[in-house]
């Protein structure tokens, strides 16, 4: 079964940092792009960035809104992708999802993890 | 960035109705358009990929059409379990990936 299990998240003060993890199983991890998407409370979906696959040298791209603050990485030995979030602001409060990029579509998604930025 | 304009933002229909949601891209995206279903408290689920292809296991009452800038998502014979928010998403070669604003479907 293809599965993504997320961990991390929680409450952090403005200006703080947090790292989210996403453990993948059931598919050839190195052969897939992995993306991060977030959803602010009661709002729509916002793409944050992606790590490409082995054939594309695991290159990474970010949305303008998080570039320079968020860092995506992956560990092939642990079949996991990570989202390091720095300089967090209240507007970063959201549910964060990892997702396997399957030919442009996100399938499946992790269960999501809530990040709350508040003093 | 490619803007995705989805309408309506909310919709109320009855069981058995045919429901249609539209999504318009700000520029030609070919067929690089997906549709997702998000039930309350859950992660989104891919329903339609490449504008018109049903993902595995998705009931045949769901369908998608369109290309270029104008796309349509249809549910034939609406069922109670279809209550959700639906999003379109484009994945043209140029980043970023962008989503429509969502359509909240109620019965």
Image (tube, grey):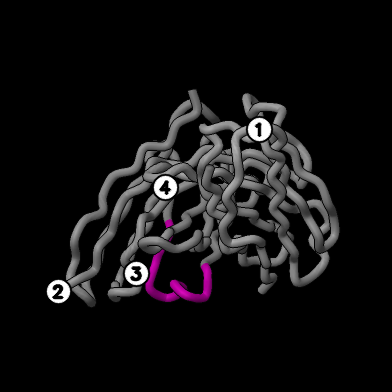
Residue B100 image offset from top left, x and y in percent: 61, 62
Whether residue A102 is visible to the viewer of this picture, yes or no, is yes
Q: Which residue is mark 2?
A: A119
Query: Distance of mark 1 from mark 3, alpha carbons?
Result: 40 Å
Calculate the distance from the C-alpha at mark 4 to the C-alpha at mark 2.
28 Å
| Crowd tier of the residue under label 4, counting other residues whose Cα lies within 10 Å: few below 14, some 14–19, many 20 or above | many
Q: Tell whether label 4 touches label 1 (CB within 8 Å).
A: no
Q: Label 2 vs label 3: CA separation?
A: 13 Å
User: Which numbered disc, 2 or 1, marks the residue closer to the eye?
Assistant: 1
Q: Which residue does the numbered mark 3 point to in the structure image?
A: A92
Whether labels 2 and 1 belong to a single chain: the reply is no
From this viewpoint, which residue is outermost toward the front? Answer: B14
From the viewer's perspective, is the residue at label 1 or at label 4 nearer?
A: 1
On the picture, is A61 further left or further right than A81?
Answer: right
Chain part drawn in magenta: A63-72
The numbered dot on residue A81 is 4
Label drawn at residue A72:
none
Q: Is residue A66 magenta?
A: yes
Name the chain letter of the residue that bears numbered label 2.
A
């Amino acid at each position: 079964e293809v599965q993504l299990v997320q961990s991390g998240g929680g409450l952090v003060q403005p200006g703080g940092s947090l790292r989210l993890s996403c453990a993948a199983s059931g598919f050839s991890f190195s052969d897939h792009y992995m993306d991060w998407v977030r959803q602010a409370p009661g709002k729509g979906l916002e793409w944050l960035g992606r790590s490409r696959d082995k054939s594309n040298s695991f290159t990474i791209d970010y949305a303008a809104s998080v570039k320079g603050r968020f860092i995506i990485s992956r560990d092939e030995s642990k079949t996991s992708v990570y989202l390091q979030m720095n300089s967090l602001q209240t507007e970063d409060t959201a549910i964060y999802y990892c997702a396997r990029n399957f030919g442009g579509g996100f399938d499946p998604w992790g269960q999501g993890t809530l990040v709350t930025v508040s003093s | 960035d490619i803007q995705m304009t989805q309408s309506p933002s909310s919709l109320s229909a009855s069981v058995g109705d045919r429901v249609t949601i539209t999504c318009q891209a700000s520029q030609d995206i070919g067929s690089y358009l997906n549709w997702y279903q998000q039930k309350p408290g859950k992660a989104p689920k891919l329903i339609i990929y490449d504008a018109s292809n049903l993902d595995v296991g998705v009931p045949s009452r769901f369908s998608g059409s369109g290309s270029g800038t104008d796309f349509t998502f249809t549910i034939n014979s609406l069922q109670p379990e279809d209550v959700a928010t639906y999003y379109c998403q484009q994945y043209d070669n140029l980043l970023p990936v962008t989503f429509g604003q969502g359509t909240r479907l109620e019965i």
